[in-house]
Image (spheres, rainbow, N blue to C red):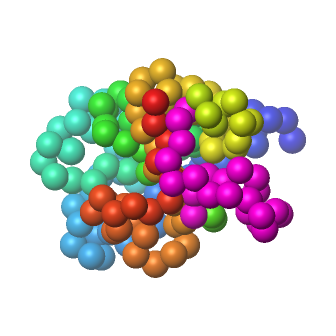
Amino acid sequence: MDRTHGDYMGMLATMINSMALQAALESKGVQTRLQSAIEMKEIAEPYVRRRAVRHLEKGRVVIFGAGTGNPYFTTDSAASLRAIELNVEVILKGTRVDGVYSADPEKNPNATKYDMISFDDVYGRGLKVMDMTAFTLCKENDLPIIIFDMDTPGNLIKVMNGDQVGTIVRN
C-alpha cells in the first residue's frame, strides 16, 4: 500500500475516534460539534474556521477529525494548525508517558523528566515531543504545549484546572 492510501485510512480512523469522543462527551451533557477536514456530511460538519470559532463562542466543544485532509501531515500537525488558526492558548497532548524526558522512559529507567522545557532545548537535545512540522508551527507561533499521560484518570481535568501535570514546552 502506498503512503497516500495509508494516510487517508488514518484520517478515517481519526473520524471513528472523534465520533466516540463526541458520544462520550454528549453522554455527560457536553454540547459538541464534530468538524471534518474530509466531507462526511452525514456525520460531521465540514471544517470551517469561522464556524468553529462561533461554536466555541457558544461554549461548545469542537472536535476536529480527519487531520488536515491531506496525506503526509500527522494528527499533531493538524492539531497545531487548527490551534493556531483558532488562536487557542495551549495545545494539550495526551500520550502514554507523563511528560518529556531526557530519554525514552519506557526504555531507560534513568531518564529524567522535565516539568518545563523550552522549544530550543527540545531541539538542542534531540528530544521527541511530536513531529517536527507540528513542533515548529507551535514554536514559531508561540503556542505552548502541555504533554501529559492520558491514561491516568483525572489528568485531563487537572491540566484544565491549571494543575502542574506533565511537561510544559514553551518559548
Residue 111, position as x, y percentages in the image: 74, 59
Q: Is residue 113 above or below residue 87?
A: below
Residue 134, position as x, y percentages in the image: 57, 32
Which is nearer the eye, 161 or 20?
161
Residue 106, position as x, y percentages in the image: 77, 66
Q: Residue at x 41, y 27 (%)?
A: 142
Does any portion of residue 40 appear in the rendered image?
Answer: no
Q: Residue at x 50, y 59 (%)?
A: 166
Which is nearer the eye, 105 or 83?
105
Which is nearer the eye, 36 or 57?
57
Quarter of image, res 135: top right
Q: Residue at x 70, y 41 (%)?
A: 127
Q: Is residue 105 magenta?
A: yes
Q: Residue at x 63, y 42 (%)?
A: 130
Task: Name the side, left or right, on which 75 lies relative to 40.
Answer: right
Residue 21, position as x, y percentages in the image: 42, 64
Q: Please provide the residue range marked out in magenta.
A: 98-119
Name the quarter where the N terminus is drawn: top right
Q: Residue furthest top?
A: 140
Does any portion of residue 111 appear in the rendered image?
Answer: yes
Tag count in the figure?
0
Q: Is residue 47 magenta?
A: no
